[in-house]
Amino acid sequence: MTDLKIGIIKHYYDKLGVAVLELSGDLGVGDKIKFVRGGEDLFTQEVKSMQVEHEQKESAKKGDIVGLKVDTEAKEGAEVYKVT
């Protein structure tokens, strides 16, 4: 099993439970992702919903900035990997 780095957390809105993710790879609803910071796995979750420029999207591509609903607090600077 290899994990593919797909982005980094730029901001986290704690009241909304939303992380702003700058993508360096493709991401879609239903993908399983892992959050890592300082070499430590923080948590893993399935992508349930995401937005690009305040519009619901089923998928996003490299270079997009997405808002991602997260289950747990996501720290700024955390790397995000797609679990395959």
Image (cartoon, rainbow, N blue to C red):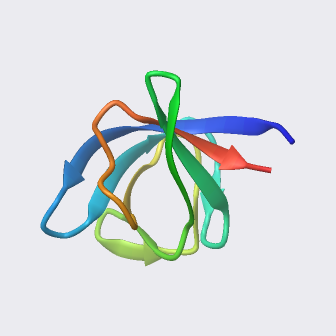
Q: Percent position (x, y) of residue 79?
A: 48, 34
Question: Quadrant location of residue 71?
Answer: bottom left
Is residue 35 toward the left or the right of residue 14 in the image? right
For residue 70, say whether it is visible: yes
Q: Is residue 2 above or below residue 43?
A: above
Q: Nearer the viewer, residue 9 or 43?
A: 43
Query: What residue is drawn where x is 52% and y is 23%?
Result: 39
For residue 69, say whether it is visible: no
Q: Is residue 50 above or below residue 63?
A: below
Number of numbered discs: 0
Query: What residue is drawn where x is 24% and y is 44%?
Result: 11
Q: Nearer the viewer, residue 27 or 47?
A: 47
Q: Percent position (x, y) of residue 53?
A: 31, 63
Q: Nearer the viewer, residue 58 or 12?
A: 12
- Residue ranking furthest to the top: 38
- Residue ranking furthest to the right: 1
Question: Quadrant location of residue 68?
Answer: bottom left
Is residue 73 toward the left or the right of residue 23 in the image? left
Query: What residue is drawn where x is 57% and y is 48%?
Result: 34
Question: Quadrant location of residue 69?
Answer: bottom left
Q: Percent position (x, y) of residue 44?
A: 56, 55
Q: Nearer the viewer, residue 66 or 5?
A: 5
Q: Percent position (x, y) of residue 74?
A: 33, 49
- Residue ranking furthest to the left: 15
Is residue 64 toward the left or the right of residue 25 in the image? left
Query: What residue is drawn where x is 19% and y is 70%?
Result: 16
Task: Name the image quarter holding the N terminus.
Answer: top right
